[in-house]
């Protein structure tokens, strides 16, 4: 089952991107380097934790 999640910048905490992943194949949270327009640089983006 594929679920949607939001990527959050680890520097400024801005939510910039939306992604999908298969929870059965990738049980860990996703993180990747992406461009953040607020920081104006490539920064580490992590999957936003659900509350």
Image (cartoon, rainbow, N blue to C red):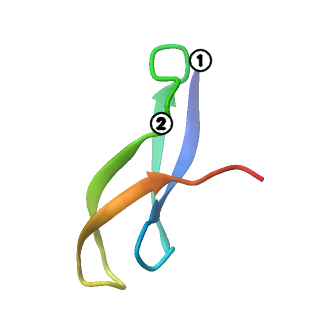
User: Where 9 falls versus 20 (above or below)?
Assistant: below
Residue 14 rendering spot, x and y as whole percentages:
49, 75
The quarter in which the N terminus is drawn is: top right
Residue at image coords 47%, 30%: 21
Residue 24 rendering spot, x and y as whole percentages:
54, 14
Q: Is residue 2 left or right of residue 9?
A: right
Q: In 3D space, how far apart are the residues under numbered discs 1 and 2 (Cα atoms)?
A: 10 Å
Element class at badge 1? loop
Residue 39 rendering spot, x and y as whole percentages:
31, 84
* Mark linked to residue 22: none
Q: How many marks?
A: 2
Q: Are marks 1 and 2 in contact (CB under 8 Å)?
A: no
User: Where 35 falls versus 17 (above or below)?
Assistant: below
User: In terms of depth relative to the viewer, which is nearer, 26 or 5?
Assistant: 26
Residue position marked by numbered label 2 in the rendering: 20
Residue at image coords 46%, 15%: 25
Name which of mark 1 and mark 2 comes first in the sequence.
Answer: 1
Residue 8 rendering spot, x and y as whole percentages:
48, 63
Element class at badge 2? strand
Q: Answer few, some or many: residues within 10 Å of disc 1's Cα (few below 14, many 20 plus, some between 14 and 19).
A: few
User: In terms of depth relative to the viewer, which is nearer, 33 or 22?
Assistant: 33
Residue at image coords 44%, 53%: 46
Residue position marked by numbered label 1 in the rendering: 1
Residue positioned most to the top: 24
Residue at image coords 57%, 54%: 48
């Amino acid at each position: 089952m594929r679920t949607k999640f939001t990527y959050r910048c680890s520097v400024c905490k801005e939510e910039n991107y939306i992604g999908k992943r298969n929870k059965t194949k990738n049980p860990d949270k996703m993180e990747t380097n992406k461009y953040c327009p607020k920081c104006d640089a490539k920064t580490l983006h992590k999957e936003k934790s659900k509350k």
